[in-house]
């Protein structure tokens, strides 16, 4: 097939060379190659803008200059948004909103084929192909941003925050989640990016510790970096209920439930970073202590390793007996509260095919209700019921 394609494309070029009548140079149009040869191998390759994604990844972006990369960035983020949305509609319990047409035909600049349904291999399911597309495009985005540092602060990245964080909501290959977190590690170096991260996004970032424990360290490192960059992130973490998933990781018994000591130390590091914030640190300490015990307030400013060691010990504070039994009961209730919180967030903010930086509703009331229920939980622990 490839030989036939080359011969077909060479015919007009050879004819022009043999006649030499036309004084103008011959111009070969590569942009319409797929439409001229719809059955060729390249016609079924994932293409975003003018770039074949798989080849870009295989070549590690070599040959793509900054200007070309900038032109590639926006359609790549757009394609990721649409493909992530489409993949989400294929999952159990998900459906496409009636007002949204799930097809990239409405965005022909994204790809030469319909990213949201047409598959290259007949033997592969639509969901598998969508997941493969997502994997390829995230790998391409990592390479693009690493090769061209200037693009890490491009406005397209800022506008596509929802696309980046929404990917963390889905059950995908570990490589995809790692790519997303590598991108977030780069973008979080920007104070502007950090200051505009929404509460729901931070919840999904921290929930990846439960969804994909193998990437928990990377996720918690991003959370720490974001908190260091902006007091607004700290405020947002408080209001969105992010202390719940952080406490959940901290309370996991060592080497069980997929948790390891490094993960618990990483969660402790996020907490100590939040407490160290000059504007909102005192409130973080107060709220976190209300989940745990009052004795934790003085330990939050210690080293993360010391916080984990203190968590594994025993003490009495404010009528709360802190021991292994209390931790196990509290951990179970924390997991229930996180589940309930995420259900509300999912209903408020379904995955969208379009990147957005519009203000997102923060489930402040849900978080405060969770605190009340945890207080009642402590009462039952105290009463032995």
Image: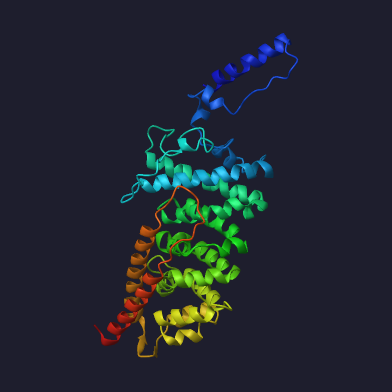
Quarter of the C terminus within the rendering: bottom left
Report how many numbered discs are placed on residues in the image: 0
Q: Is residue 254 left or right of residue 148?
A: left
Q: Residue at x 65, y 41 (%)?
A: 68
Tell me if I can see residue 65 in this picture: no
Of all residues shown, which one is farthest toward the left? 385
| Furthest-right residue in this view | 23
Q: Residue at x 38, y 90 (%)?
A: 318
Q: Position of residue 292 (x, y in %)?
A: 40, 81
In which image quadrant can residue 130 be found? top left
| Residue depicted at 71% across the width and 9% down the height | 19
Residue 106 placement (x, y as % from top left): 47, 37
Q: Position of residue 20 (x, y in %)?
A: 73, 11
Q: Nearer the viewer, residue 316 or 25?
A: 25
Identify whether 175 is placed above or below 384. above
Question: In which image quadrant can residue 369 be found?
Answer: bottom left
Q: Position of residue 195 (x, y in %)?
A: 57, 65
Q: Can residue 282 be seen in the rendering of this structure?
A: yes
Coloring scheme used: rainbow
Q: Is residue 202 above or below residue 51?
A: below
């Amino acid at each position: 097939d490839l030989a036939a394609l080359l011969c077909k494309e060479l015919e007009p070029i050879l004819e022009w060379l043999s006649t030499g009548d036309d004084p103008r140079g011959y111009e070969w149009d590569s942009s319409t190659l797929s439409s001229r040869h719809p059955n060729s191998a390249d016609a079924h390759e994932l293409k975003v803008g003018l770039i074949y994604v798989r080849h870009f990844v295989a070549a590690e972006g070599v040959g793509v200059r900054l200007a070309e990369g900038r032109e590639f960035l926006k359609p790549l983020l757009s394609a990721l948004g649409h493909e992530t949305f489409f993949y989400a509609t294929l999952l159990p319990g998900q459906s496409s909103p009636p007002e949204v047409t799930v097809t990239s035909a409405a965005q022909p600049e994204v790809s030469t084929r319909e990213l949201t349904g047409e598959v290259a291999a007949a033997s592969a399911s639509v969901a598998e192909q969508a997941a493969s597309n997502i994997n390829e495009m995230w790998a391409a985005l990592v390479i693009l941003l690493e090769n061209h540092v200037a693009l890490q602060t491009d406005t397209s990245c800022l506008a596509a925050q929802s696309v980046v964080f929404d990917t963390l909501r889905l059950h995908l290959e570990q490589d995809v989640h790692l790519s997303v977190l590598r991108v977030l590690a780069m973008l979080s170096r920007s104070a502007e990016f950090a200051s505009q991260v929404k509460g729901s996004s931070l919840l999904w970032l921290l929930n990846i510790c439960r969804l994909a424990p193998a990437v928990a360290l990377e996720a918690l490192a991003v959370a720490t970096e974001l908190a260091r960059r902006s007091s607004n992130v700290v405020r947002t973490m408080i209001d969105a209920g992010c202390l719940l998933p952080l406490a959940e990781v901290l309370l996991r018994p060592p080497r069980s439930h997929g948790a390891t000591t490094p993960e618990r130390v990483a969660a402790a590091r996020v907490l100590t970073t939040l407490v160290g914030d000059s504007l909102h640190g005192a409130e973080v300490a107060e709220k976190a202590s209300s989940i745990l015990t009052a004795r934790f307030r003085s330990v939050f400013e210690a080293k993360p390793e010391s916080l984990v060691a203190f968590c594994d010990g025993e003490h009495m504070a404010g009528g709360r007996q802190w021991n292994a039994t209390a931790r196990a009961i509290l951990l179970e209730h924390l997991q229930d509260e996180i589940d309930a919180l995420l259900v509300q967030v999912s209903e408020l903010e379904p995955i969208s095919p379009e990147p957005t930086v519009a203000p997102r509703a923060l489930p402040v009331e849900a978080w405060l209700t969770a605190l009340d229920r945890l207080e009642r939980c402590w009462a039952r622990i105290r009463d032995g019921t």
